[in-house]
């Protein structure tokens, strides 16, 4: 309810500014403050009417995480760690996991190791990790849908700005100096709407959707790897399983084996 109220206030305030407080602006080419303010704030305001503030912050968090994360490198790193741990567990028992727990950065992987060390059953581990995987996938899917919605709203807000600009222009035909600003809002609002939709929001929606699928693939690999660790399967078997999700370069496999031999 708070997000809906905030969205309504933001939208009405933005519309009021464009309609009644922007008459003094001059035509300055491809920049118009009123049209820019309308296209920055009004799509977000409309989105908040139907969604929560937490959805917006979750989407922004997804973009930041996606920007600084290389999914392929993360998958390769996790695959190498799973192979190393599998070999150590087969040689030294489950106590070997405790020594590596602090070095594991992937949150789902770390959660799985903690569950193993706390003697959870295979079914309990599977249930917990699947639940966390589904929650993260739903969060990223919601973020993608949010940016897709912004991509649909922006051209509509651009059309709204066009109509407001036309009304301002027609209402001041007797004053030639007022025609330019009204025409600027009318034309540039449509331009800004198309730019925001097709150059920012829709590409972000596609990017987050692709990131979501890669993270789901990574989490599924982690899930299977953790369950194989719990069952103390051989490192060769585990390597065959994780290879279906990613191809680990041979030089990295050799490095992993050397690390395992030194640890042993």
Image (spheres, helix red, strand yellow):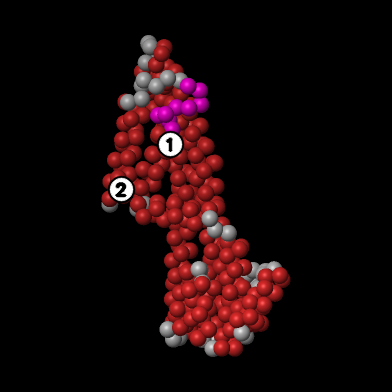
Q: Position of residue 25 (x, y in %)?
A: 39, 22
C-alpha distance separating marks 1 and 2: 19 Å
Q: Residue at x 42, y 19 (%)?
A: 26
**Residue placed at 35% from the left, 53% from the top?**
52
Q: Residue at x 56, y 85 (%)?
A: 89
Q: Are marks 1 and 2 in contact (CB under 8 Å)?
A: no
In the rendered image, residue 257, in percent from the top left (x then y), is placed at: 66, 78
Q: Earlier in the sequence, mark 1 or mark 2?
A: 2
> Which of labels 1 and 2 is toward the front?
1
Q: Which residues are magenta?
A: 28-36
User: Which numbered dot is residue 39?
Assistant: 1
Locate residue 144 relative to residue 261 in the image: left or right: left
- Return the residue at label 2: 4
Whether residue 30 is in magenta: the answer is: yes
Q: Nearer the viewer, residue 46 or 232?
A: 232
Give coordinates of residue 188: x percent, y percent: 48, 28
Residue 21, can we see it?
Answer: yes
In the rendered image, the quadrant that contains the C terminus is bottom right
């Amino acid at each position: 309810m708070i997000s809906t109220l905030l969205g309504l206030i933001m939208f009405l305030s933005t519309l009021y500014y464009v309609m009644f407080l922007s008459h003094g602006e001059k035509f300055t080419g491809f920049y118009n403050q009123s049209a820019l303010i309308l296209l920055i704030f009004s799509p977000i305001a409309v989105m908040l009417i139907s969604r929560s503030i937490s959805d917006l912050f979750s989407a922004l968090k997804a973009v930041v995480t996606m920007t600084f994360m290389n999914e392929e490198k993360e998958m390769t790193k996790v695959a190498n760690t799973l192979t190393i741990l599998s070999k150590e567990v087969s040689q030294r028992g489950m106590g070997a996991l405790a020594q590596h727990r602090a070095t594991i950065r992937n949150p789902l992987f770390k959660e799985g190791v903690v569950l193993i060390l706390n003697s959870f059953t295979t079914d309990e581990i599977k249930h917990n990790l699947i639940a966390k995987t589904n929650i993260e996938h739903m969060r990223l899917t919601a973020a993608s849908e949010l940016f897709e919605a912004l991509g649909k709203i922006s051209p509509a807000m651009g059309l709204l700005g066009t109509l407001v600009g036309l009304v301002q222009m027609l209402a001041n035909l007797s004053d030639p100096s007022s025609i330019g600003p009204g025409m600027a809002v009318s034309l540039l609002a449509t331009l800004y709407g198309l730019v925001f939709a097709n150059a920012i929001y829709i590409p972000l929606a596609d990017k987050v959707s692709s990131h979501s699928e890669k993270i789901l693939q990574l989490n599924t690999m982690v899930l299977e790897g953790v369950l194989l660790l719990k069952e103390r399967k051989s490192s060769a078997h585990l390597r065959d399983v994780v290879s279906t999700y990613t191809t680990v370069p041979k030089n990295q496999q050799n490095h992993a084996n050397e690390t395992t031999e030194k640890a042993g």
